[in-house]
Amino acid sequence: MITYAKKLVLIAITSGLCTTSMESKADTVNVFAASSLVKVLSEVRRQYLSKSSEKITNSFAASSTLANQIARGAPSDIFISANKSWMNFLDKQLAINTSSKKPFLLNRIVLAAYEKNWRPIEVLTKKTVNTLLSGGRLSIGDPTHVPAGIYGKQALQTLGLWKIVQDRLAPAANVRAALAMVERNETPIGLIYRTDALNSKKVKIVFTFQNTSHNQIEYIMAIVQSKERPAVKAYYNFIMSPAVKHIYARFGFELP
């Protein structure tokens, strides 16, 4: 015979099981993305969460930093790299689902200056570079591993200007850090992405490099190996869907 007290215990246990079951339905999707995507992916996340109960966490850093973290087992579900090299690095280690590796967005490299300092120029020469630097340094994502820095170095090499700046660099851990140096007027100019310059109120674009001066700036997205849960696939598809293309355009990105 079940006593009244026992009934209360059973009800409490059953309620607890129901609560646990409901909580377990909310999955967390961890996105590791290049630092230049901070603002645009934060907006995409906001749009998605307005219609979904899933949890989305964004972690931003240099693509090189994130790729190495994923290779060491960091809890990432989706990786978005600012170049193909770091995505291929993970692909060779069987760390991503190769079939999910897709072109995502396109960008441009520009030379940016503190907002009040300079006007746009049409031709970049040794003389204009020296004038822009004015004895200061050039902020740049570390060209040994940061994609924006690699692209920037290629662009300057194409124009024959790398040698005059290579000893006057202020290398940064990622492109957002390079942007911050210019925003604080710590460096007179910086090599950054066009989208970062457009979405900053403190810098202005002085010169835009031709796409032919460097490798194509193409962001690549993929699902991390063994992480193809329904929630991960749903968010991956949302990021790639036409429903958010207007967001990418608003922040200055181009589609491949």
Image (cartoon, rainbow, N blue to C red):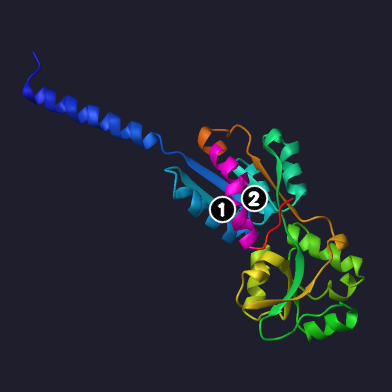
Mark 2 crowd level (few <14, some 14–19, many ≥20, 10 Å Cα): many
Image position, residue 90 (x, y; %): 71, 41
User: Which residue is located at x 23 percent, y 31 percent?
Assistant: 15
Image position, residue 18 (x, y; %): 29, 30
User: Looking at the picture, does residue 208 appear above or below residue 43?
Assistant: below
Residue 6 placement: quadrant: top left
Residue type at tag 1: Ser
User: Which residue is located at x 59 percent, y 57 percent?
Assistant: 247
Question: What numbered label is drawn on residue 119?
Answer: none
Residue 186 placement: quadrant: bottom right
Question: What numbered label is drawn on residue 66?
Answer: 2
Image check: 252 left or right of 41? right
**Is residue 244 covered in magenta?**
yes
Image check: 9 left or right of 238? left
Name the residue furthest right.
Answer: 160
Image position, residue 119 (x, y; %): 75, 84
Camera sees residue 188 = yes
Q: Earlier in the sequence, mark 1 or mark 2?
A: 1
> Are the residues at dot 1 and dot 2 in contact (C-beta closer than 8 Å)?
yes
Q: List the residue tagged with mark 1.
A: 59
Q: Nearer the viewer, mark 1 or mark 2?
A: 1
Camera sees residue 172 = no
Residue 248 placement: quadrant: bottom right
What secondary structure is marked by label 1?
strand
What secondary structure is marked by label 2?
helix
Give the residues in magenta. 234-251
Prevailing secondary structure of the magenta residues: helix
In depth, the one of 197 and 225 nearer the eye is 197
**Is residue 185 covered in magenta?**
no
User: Which residue is located at x 8 percent, y 25 percent?
Assistant: 5
User: Looking at the picture, does residue 99 appear above or below residue 64?
Assistant: above
